[in-house]
Amino acid sequence: MYIELKNLEKVMGKKVILHNINLRMEGGKVYGLKGKNGCGKTMLMRAIAGLIKPTAGEIIINDEILWKNITFPRSMGILIENPSFINGATGFDNLKMIASIKGVATDEQIADSLERVGLDPNDTRKYRKYSLGMKQKLGIACAIMENPDIVILDEPINAIDREGVLLVRTILDTLRSENKIIIIACHDAEEMEMLADEIYEMENGEIIEKRNNKV
């Protein structure tokens, strides 16, 4: 399992959002993206997820070129910015509706993903009653419920309590052991050091530093 970006560029209007991105990611590692707001982290994640089309360059996933051979990665779970859930439905029902699109995740897998992030599958509260931390946990559960090969999480520990952060660490460790490719962005520098195997620092849409964090 691998993702390779070659000379990736994204221009919107006259603004260069991503410039000359070259990197390779392989299964069994957590890749961290760091940098100030507006540096290009989220846009890079969106490009890898197939949510935006590059202006130039290639995104290759297991020998298939995104936007040429495939429109989206074949097996991907994603949490970017604010996920869209139905306010009047429970967490379980929200995930079940999303899972019905592909028909991959069973009720048991949905329940398991909720429990892994510290949510009760039998909780009858509607999404509108969820705290910010609970909403974030539901977004992570949604990203992992179909057992994807690629997991992209933008600020996964945002608004989550300490117990929830420990659960996220456990989830990432499990995904790593299952040879998944995990890509995260995290403003918490200490937590990034704890979570990521390789860290890419971004500035003005470019990768200015790559560091192997764990040997």
Image (cartoon, rainbow, N blue to C red):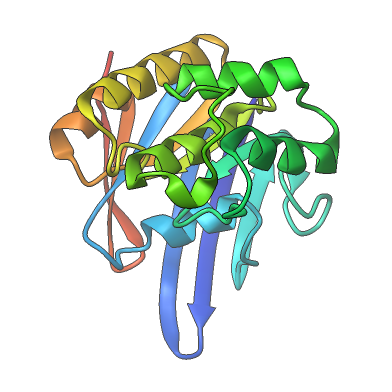
State the quadrant of the C terminus. top left
Q: Nearer the viewer, residue 194 or 147?
A: 147
Is residue 28 visible in the rendered structure shown here? no
Horizontal and vertical percent for residue 65?
A: 74, 49
Where is 115 relative to 142, above or below?
Answer: above
Horizontal and vertical percent for residue 127?
A: 52, 47
Q: How many marks?
A: 0
Q: Residue at x 34, y 61 (%)?
A: 206
Q: Nearer the viewer, residue 90 or 110?
A: 90
Where is 84 relative to 108, above or below?
Answer: below
The residue lying furthest to the left in this view is 190
The residue lying furthest to the bottom in this view is 14
Residue 57, located in which quarter of the rendered image?
bottom right
Horizontal and vertical percent for residue 150?
A: 60, 32
The residue lying furthest to the front in this view is 124
Residue 170, located in which quarter of the rendered image?
top left
Is residue 153 visible in the rendered structure shown here? yes
